[in-house]
Amino acid sequence: MLSILIPVYNYDISRLVGELHRQGTEAAVDFEILILDDASTRPSPANEALGRLPFVSYSRLPENIGRARIRNRLAAAAAYENLLFLDCDAEIGCGFINNYLPFCDGESVVLGGIAYDEEEKNPAYSLRLKYGRKREARPAPEREKHRSFATFNFLIPASVLKRVGFDERLRGYGNEDTLLGYELRALGVPLYQIDNPALHRGLDENPVFLEKTRQSVANLFRLLREEDYASLLQSSQLLRSYFRIRKLGLLPTASFLFWLFRRGLEAQLCSPSPSLFLFDLYKLGYLCRLAGEGMTACQPLSENGGKNNRNPA
């Protein structure tokens, strides 16, 4: 019936798994919870104890394999056709499992959404909170309008994921979920947005979120060089702005301006009241900087640069 798949890195998931196990048991359906630790540098002893629960499996990898590969590996190990992916820093509410069960009999992908604690006010997380609340925590109709796709909390048939898989050439943070969404749409797989959000608890402090943002932009530029994802490149607002700058011959100017104002932008974005407009400019400037430097700070997608490193689940 349902395989619940949770990749873990440096996070205590005992509360999440306990609630999933309770809801799965009360729903009286066949289920399993597979937990795979991506070589955490600070593994939680509480996580290892979860493997003693019925229908729960916990394993720890000897080396870190990254966000895409670990999800493919979890999917390959799943016993059931319906795969429910959750990030380890999620928190679920009552009825979470039951809300997904009506969709466990088809070929559709279902995205439950993400939410943020309205009581969280810590300025150390101001950028992550503002971005999450304004750009991610949207009701289902808005997510449908913006064609959102996030792997934080979603249900997918194993047969569908086997046709695509997460792109293992992407390393670090960012865009592996975006690519999966675009490829599913290209295959004509129905994507449904529902209001079944999981609360995002593991917030990044502002400097960490900026570093992850740079990784995400670098991944996008790698894809731009590979030219594998024309539909993605044409649909990205960030890339459309980049192409306009490049067409006007302003890449050197934009790269220089980013270098000149980078520290000031980062100071503003790490302040208690960050600007999402400036955050978008920061991403655009960093992309132009990468292009101006010839991507010297980034590694190739793969040794051979081709798509044959793709490893579907």
Image (spheres, rainbow, N blue to C red):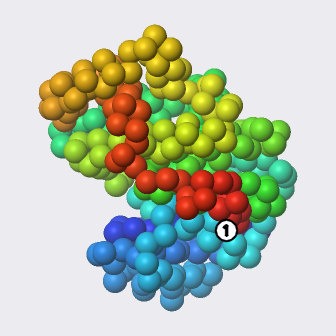
Q: Residue at x 50, y 14 (%)?
A: 247
- Name the image quarter holding residue 302: bottom right
Q: Position of residue 192 (x, y in %)?
A: 71, 39
Q: Residue furthest top?
A: 248
- 169 left or right of 99? left
What's under tag 1, amino acid-wise?
A: Ala
Residue at image mark 1: 75
- Relative to 120, is 87 on the left or the right? right
For residue 25, say whether it is visible.
Answer: no
Left or right side of 149 for 189: right
22 up-or-down from 108: above or below: below
Rendering quarter of residue 157: bottom right
The answer to whether one can see residue 79 in this image is: yes
Mark 1 burial class by Cα count in 10 Å: few <14, some 14-19, many 20+: many
Q: Quadrant of the N terminus?
A: bottom right
Percent position (x, y) of residue 132? Answer: 39, 36
